[in-house]
Amino acid sequence: MNLSGENIPSLSVDIMSILKKSAIKNAVRYSWWPPKESTDECDIQDSDVFSYTEGPLLVYMESGEVVGFSSDESKNSIVVWLEKDADGNIHEEDIENDNELFPISYNEKSYSGGVWNTIAGRRIVKVTLIKRSPQTVKYEDLPNEVGVLLTIENGSEFYLCHQLCGKSTNFSATDKNGLEEKLLDQLSFMEI
């Protein structure tokens, strides 16, 4: 599978299918700032740092594969890539070893909460693409794939999304409570 480049979820179905092949081992947010600094930079509480800091998210699967997620303003979408394949080959940008990013694990109690506490050892049973209606004419030619909803076998759901939360960040990893309610009628959902 291709380890070079990132793309919108609808053009990365092979990567998205990895999420349903094995259980989640770990999830790490690679923040632009140390956790304490993120609270000031993003105007958030300590327990919200994992969900709302700026920076990519890597989801580690028990199969050894690692799937990356982030946000791309120019596409008005989230993007996905294969960070590491099952053979241990690593993506060209290698987020894990980027010394300018600060790793924050899903289970760091001070900086993570809510749905994230339920993911370890669980399987993702459904992946749903979220599209947003174009807000203005300038968005009409963009993919507008603003999120992915991941449903876990225990019924928990979490959203990886681009500009759907009332926080100052572009890319968020949250549960439904974190979404801006006024945007919900602009969204369409399609299982992939």
Image (spheres, grey):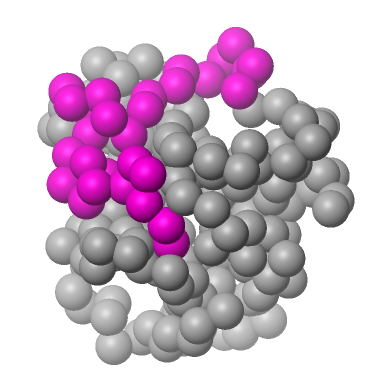
Residue 123 visible somewhere in the drawing: yes
- Determine if the magenta segment contains residue 77: no
The residue lying toward the viewer, choosing from 42 and 189, is: 189
Residue 129 is situated, as x and y percent measured from the top left of the image, at 50, 76
Residue 110 is situated, as x and y percent measured from the top left of the image, at 17, 23
Residue 150 visible somewhere in the drawing: no
- Determine if the magenta segment contains residue 115: yes
Q: In the figure, 9 relative to 168: above or below? A: below
The residue lying toward the viewer, choosing from 141 and 109, is: 109
Side of 22 relative to 3 (left or right): left
Residue sitting at x 79%, y 36%: 87
> What is the magenta range?
96-124
The residue lying toward the viewer, choosing from 153 and 78, is: 153
Residue 3 is situated, as x and y percent measured from the top left of the image, at 82, 44
Q: Quadrant of the C terminus?
A: bottom right
Q: In the figure, 99 relative to 30: above or below? A: above
